[in-house]
Amino acid sequence: MTAPLRIGPYAIERLLGVGSFATVWLGHDRALDAHVAIKVLAENWSHDLRVRERFLDEARLLRRLEHERLIRVHAVGELPDGRPYAVLAWADGGSLRDRLAVGEIPAPAALRLLGEVCAGVAVLHRHGVVHRDLTPGNILFRSAGPGGPEQVLIADLGLAKALAAASGLTARAGTPGYMAPEQDDPGAVVDTRADVYGLGRLGIRLLAADPSGANPTGPDPPRHVPEIRLRDDVPAAVAAVLARSTAHRPADRYPDAATLHAALTRASAPVAGTGGSGLTGRPVALTGASAPAVLAAPTGPVRRRPAPPPGARRPYRLRLAGVAVVAVAAVGAVGAESGGAGSARPVGGTYTAGPLTVALPPGWSATGATWAGQYGADGEPEPALVMSPQPRRWAADPRLPGAFVGLSASTAARTTPAGFLAERTHSDCASAPARATGQAGVEWTVVAYRCDRGRPQIIESAALHPGRPALVYVQIAPPADSGPAFVDTLLAGVHLR
């Protein structure tokens, strides 16, 4: 990857991190002699209007909350190719993921750190926001000057949603091993208790005697799993708090991060008669169907992993420069159809990309693509195309009409056209009731959105392939003076093989 020389007014020094959703660069503000982290939307997502909205929503949300426990946003901008970027405070101490890669954090420090993270998430909950992706990579550290305390910051709110809009979210959003079971349930309500679950899993990762076995491999852990033992210097009452936090049913967890933080504080206090350690020497467990695991404070010596060879272990407070990037989905590539030499096809007529053929509206052209985040059974990205008067600019320029067309067998295997469209809601837009229309032998479900900013209208439509198990999706930004007839004509021009 070639580093840009500048992004906006900032000189670029190096790459900090790469994810499927964004790339983060270390920039330098010469006027203020200060470093910043610049998060740029990944090129393969630039055609998706909803992903652009989510990217900008994260920046707006952080700017609105403006709190010392959250990563701060200084500005937003747009690259010459139309991709948005956000200028963030640089977390010069790196991430918790970085530090855990160096070595385990002593239990007392880990407990204090978990409390700081709970306090940061409580800020979100007070403002009616649920994070939904609390992982070590999203916990950052920033120095506060010589001799000052280090700040613990909550980052990557790209998956966060206002609680009022969280009900009915059907797309998986979160990291396996840390996401709550209900985040994988299309009909579930995702609220602050999902974050409580993530905090509980984070606590288990920090405090388990064997961290390598502390996290399940899937997003929905079984209700009865092998016992997880905490380290011998962890108060036994903490095990009960973590067990309740990670209960399978949301109703059995603490209601929010502030309540969990208070419970952790009480559980971490020394217990009379235990020599100040807070240990009772008895296993602590939750029973019943709601308990996902048995957590126990060890009753005897804990087997320790062998110490690393001399010189291999670095100090805990190692200064690691890095910014975590949220990974919403796997990377997909965007490129022209073979033979297109990297440019759009001529204006007019039809355009074919794999099994998709579209009739181009007058004055429109098209370019081939792959559907970012969508993979077939063979592991290859699934096909898509973009068409517009300027297909490579339409997602970035709200004045341009255009459409994205994608075909996905993997999506058809998990949901229906109506269910898929329920995932495609747009913030700051009002939706009309869904309608059905039959075009060229395909039964489409169509939802129209009227928006107060950006594009005045966005059309979301989906259908099942009439001949094989695949879902076809068309997102349309119609011309300003068009009506339903334009949408129906465009859908009638989508032909599937």
Image (cartoon, grey):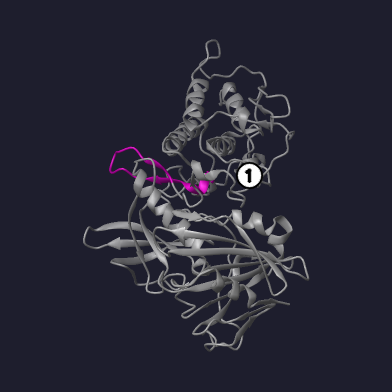
The residue labelled by disc 1 is 177
- Quick one: label 1, few (<14), some, or many (20+) residues within 10 Å? many
The magenta span reads: 132-154
In this view of the protein, can residue 39 be seen by the observer?
yes
Q: Position of residue 452 (x, y in %)?
A: 40, 58
The residue positioned farthest toward the left in the image shown: 31
For image coordinates 59% across by 75% down, the residue present is 489
Relative height, residue 101 to residue 211 (above, below): below
Mark 1 residue type: Gly
| Secondary-structure class at tag 1 | loop
Looking at the image, which residue sits at the far top? Answer: 273
Q: Is residue 428 magenta?
A: no
The residue nearer to you, when weighing 7 against 373, is 373
**In front of the other: 82 or 425:** 425
Quadrant location of the C terminus in the rendered image: bottom right
Is residue 91 visible in the rendered structure shown here?
no
Residue 151 location (% of width, % of height): 37, 41
Is 306 left or right of 48, judged from the image as shown? Answer: right
* Residue 466 appears left or right of 61: right
Residue 174's spot in the image, x, y percent? 58, 48
Q: Residue at x 65, y 56 (%)?
A: 418
Q: In the image as oriented, which residue stretches furthest toward the right?
A: 467
